[in-house]
Image (cartoon, helix red, strand yellow):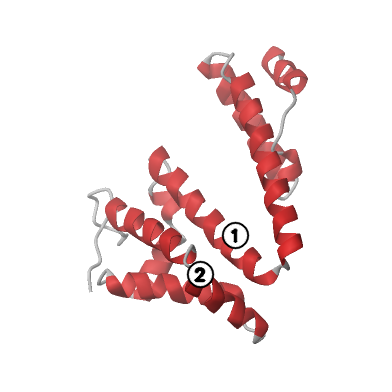
Amino acid sequence: MATTAAGGGGSSKMMTREQLLHLFSRFSFLTSLPDVKARIADAVREKQEAVAVTTEIQEEILREMGIDPSFGIGCLGKVNIVYEDDMELMVKFYQFVAKEEMAIDEAELDPREFTEKMHAQQKLQEQQLKMLIQMRKYNPESQSVILETLRKQLESANFDTDVTILTPEQIQEIVER
């Protein structure tokens, strides 16, 4: 079984960047297939946890890659620490997490509820994009202050997505402090 160290240090075992990207891509592909969606939905109907099925799918991919599944799943819990400075990988990692959440929601919610949740998610993403466009009007130092303020708000709100949006007025107020 392949286990490789990230970052060249070798002191802690971690999947490589390429291995993680392959896992993320393959999982996204598989969970978009009708038979895999049906597999997750069937598990929910049989009163199984949908997350158990998505984890099983991840383990199958890891086996295909020649990686011990328990090692690979353990690595997923360390991605945001080991690769925190790799913005591209972090974006792909959060897309992977969102894809898993979406696959679970699709299996657990009725079609109307799922559609409503997807619309709400799309609206939130549009608002976040507007906020980012507004933030880009400021210098990098001010942007860092804005993001740090947003991070603190998220933590204090227990990561409630309602606080992930700052109005232009709130952004201006943060910059002027």
Looking at marks 2 and 1 on the same chain, the residue that comes earlier in the sequence is marked by 2
Q: Identify the residue under disc 2.
A: 34
In the picture, residue 27 is in which quadrant? Answer: bottom left
Residue 35, image x and y in percent? 49, 74
Quadrant position of the N terminus in the picture: bottom left
Q: Identify the residue under disc 1.
A: 102
Q: Tally the numbered discs.
A: 2
Vertically, is 106 above or below 132? below
SS for dot 2: helix
Residue 59, image x and y in percent? 40, 74
Residue occupying image coordinates x 61% and y 76%: 41
Q: Amino acid at mark 1?
A: Met
Residue occupying image coordinates x 32% and y 57%: 22
The answer to which of 176 and 57 lies nearer the viewer is 57
* Number of residues whose C-alpha sits closer than 10 Å to that of mark 1, classed few (under 14), some (14–19) or many (20 or more): some
Residue 168 seen in the figure: yes
- Label 2 vs label 1: CA separation? 14 Å
Residue 82, image x and y in percent? 38, 50
- From the viewer's perspective, is 72 left or right of 56? left
